[in-house]
Every structure is written in C-alpha cells, then in structure tokens.
Image (cartoon, rainbow, N blue to C red):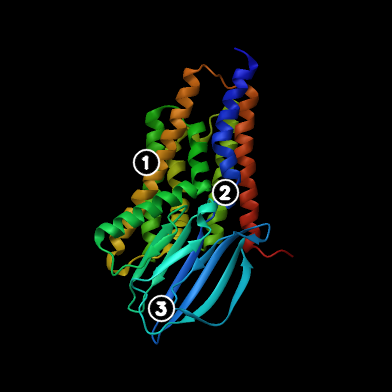
Amino acid sequence: MTAWRRWLRVLLLLVSVLPIVSHADDFSPALLQLDEREGGWVDAIWKIPAKQNRALAIAPELPDFMEPVGSPTSRLLAGAFVEHSTYRTDGRSLTGAMLTIRGLEAVPNNVLIRVTERDGTNHSTILRGANASYTIPERPGKLQVAKDYWLMGTVHILEGMDHLLFVFALMWIITGFVSLLKAVTAFTVAHSITLGLATFGVVHLPPAPTEAIIALSIVFLAAEIVHKRQGQVGITERWPWIIAFIFGLFHGLGFAGALAEIGLPQHEVPLALLMFNVGVETGQLLFVAVVLSLMAVLRRLSLALPDAGWRLVPYSIGGIAAFWTIERVVSFVPLA
C-alpha cells in the first residue's frame, strides 16, 4: 500500500473532527435575555461572542413598544461582550411580541433566546441561520416544551466540542462494539445523574473548575491512547466503562451549567429536563454513528493508518485539550 493512501486516512480523520474542535469558540452561542418586571420594566442582557476582541456582526431587534431607559453598560467578559440595558414598555405584555436577530444568517453561531415574564413564565428557544425571529408565545404546551428542549440539548452537545472530543478519544482506546456501547452507556448514565442532581440543587460545583476538569479528562484519554500504542494496557482500556462513568459525572455538571443558562419552564421542569437530556443523547449517538461510519468507509478503502498517524492523532487531541485546561484554569486561578 502506498504511503499517500495511508496518510490520506490520517488527514480525513483529522480534517473531519479536529479542526472543528480547535475552533470551538467560533461557534459559541450568543444570548438575548429579557426579564420582565412589574410596572412595565424590562431588563435585557445581550451577550455576544468576541473574536480577537471584536464582536460578531449581529444585533437584536426588539419590539417598538420597548423604549430604552438610559445608556446600556457593556464589558468584555470571558471572550464575550456583555451588554446590560433597561427598557420601559407602555404597559403591554411581552406575550405575542416578536424578537429578531439581524445578521444571523451570515454567521455560524446560534442565539439563545430566554424570556421571563412578570408572572414567572419562562420561554427559551434557539435561533440560527435563516430562522432569525421568535414570537413570544403564551404559556407553551407540553409538546412545544418537549420539542424546544430536545432541540436545545441536541444543539448543545453538537456544539460542545469538549464533550465530543472526549467521546472521540474513547473510541480510539476501546476495541469492540460491545465494549464501546458499555462505555458510552456508562457515560450517559453518569452525566444524566449529575445533570438531574445539579438542576434540582442537590449538588453544585462552580462552572470554571468543572470546565477545567472536563478538559483535563480529555488530556488523560490522549495519554491513554499513547500508552496503548506503546503496548501498555491502561486503566481506560482495562475498565472503560468505569472511566467513562467517573468523568461522565463531571461532564453532566457541565451540561447542567448550560441548562442553567437556558432556564427551565417552571410548569414543566421534569419534562424539559428529560427532553434536554434526550437531546444530548441524540446528538452524542449521531456523532458516534458518523465517526464509526467514516472509519468503516476508510477500512473498506483499505486505507491503513501509518505509525506516524497514530502518534499525530493523540498528540493533536492532547494538545487541544491541554490548551483548554490551561485557559480554563487561568480563568479562575488568580495570577501572582
């Protein structure tokens, strides 16, 4: 077999997965949050991802009856511009109002819309691409809640590059479909447990350390891939479901942080939580299916992976995850 065919398999795998992961921040969602208060007041938060200290060219378009009061305050926080502003309405409710994000069709990012009416009713949805407008409904029914939170869970996992990279690294260590199925199931059970416990306030871990541990879990798996190629049997290869379960607990706390940002409808908390989790599993299984299909196609083409390629993959995974770890640790550990 010629060398170029061997290297083609390496490039196909890396091009299909790792460049997307390394540019994860390019796909960070924006947030428009409206909190309605008594007396016709609305507090607004507009959070927009920044790249090289420049904000995305998108902006919210609010209903005409919302009049700004004073000047908005803005600051750069954790790679995003966050703007706080206050509006006065003419006494009209936000129910039935339309929110539009200008310029959304020209960027790859999603926008999370979160609205809290003065009676406590919560509304959440995700806008992307040509779907750039949202009309605030009356209290959403069960079917609408299930659809919205399933979609938000699916989108979250497919844009959660660290979670996908963890699963991808597991697939490089585990041999055999049954073993992979057990590990993915253990990962699912674990993050479902902590997602539920954190949502109901039973357990809590600050977001920054949680995200750092998640990144560190990928560094650990990258090292395990290297050990496997050196003929060593690591603990992940020996007990894959146990390692997947342990780290899955922390990944579940990460999912809970994302769900906390989205918010839950007070009248349908269990349903929304369930469907968000189902959405996460849908996206995870879709990712596993795509990677397995790609590997099957490459095997069918008899494109063997060269030794140099085996070294390139884990070091690429580990390098990206190490960068994330340092970046996240620095965000909560004060520098001297």
Q: Amino acid at mark 3?
A: Glu
Q: Amino acid at mark 2?
A: Ala
Mark closer to the observer (3, 1) = 3
Circle 3 sits in a helix, a strand or a loop, which is it?
strand
Return the residue found at the far top. Answer: 1
Question: Alpha-carbon distance for marks 3 and 1?
Answer: 41 Å
Q: Residue 303: x and y, percent?
A: 54, 19
Question: Alpha-carbon distance for marks 2 and 1?
Answer: 25 Å
User: Is 107 above or below relative to 297?
Assistant: below
Q: Residue 325: x and y, percent?
A: 61, 51
User: Is 20 above or below relative to 197?
Assistant: above
Question: Alpha-carbon distance for marks 3 and 2?
Answer: 33 Å
Q: Residue at x 43, y 36 (%)?
A: 288
User: Is 292 above or below relative to 141?
Assistant: above
Q: Earlier in the sequence, mark 3 or mark 2?
A: 2
Question: For mark 2, what is the residue?
Answer: 24
Mark closer to the observer (3, 2) = 3
Circle 2 sits in a helix, a strand or a loop, which is it?
helix
Return the residue found at the far front. Answer: 64
Q: Earlier in the sequence, mark 2 or mark 1?
A: 2
Which of the image's four quarters has the C terminus? Answer: bottom right
Viewer-closest of 242 and 46: 46
Disc on res. 36: 3
Circle 1 sits in a helix, a strand or a loop, which is it?
helix
Question: For mark 1, what is the residue?
Answer: 185
Q: Earlier in the sequence, mark 3 or mark 1?
A: 3
Crowding at mark 1 (Cα within 10 Å: few <14, some 14-19, many 20+): some
Q: Residue 332: x and y, percent?
A: 62, 63
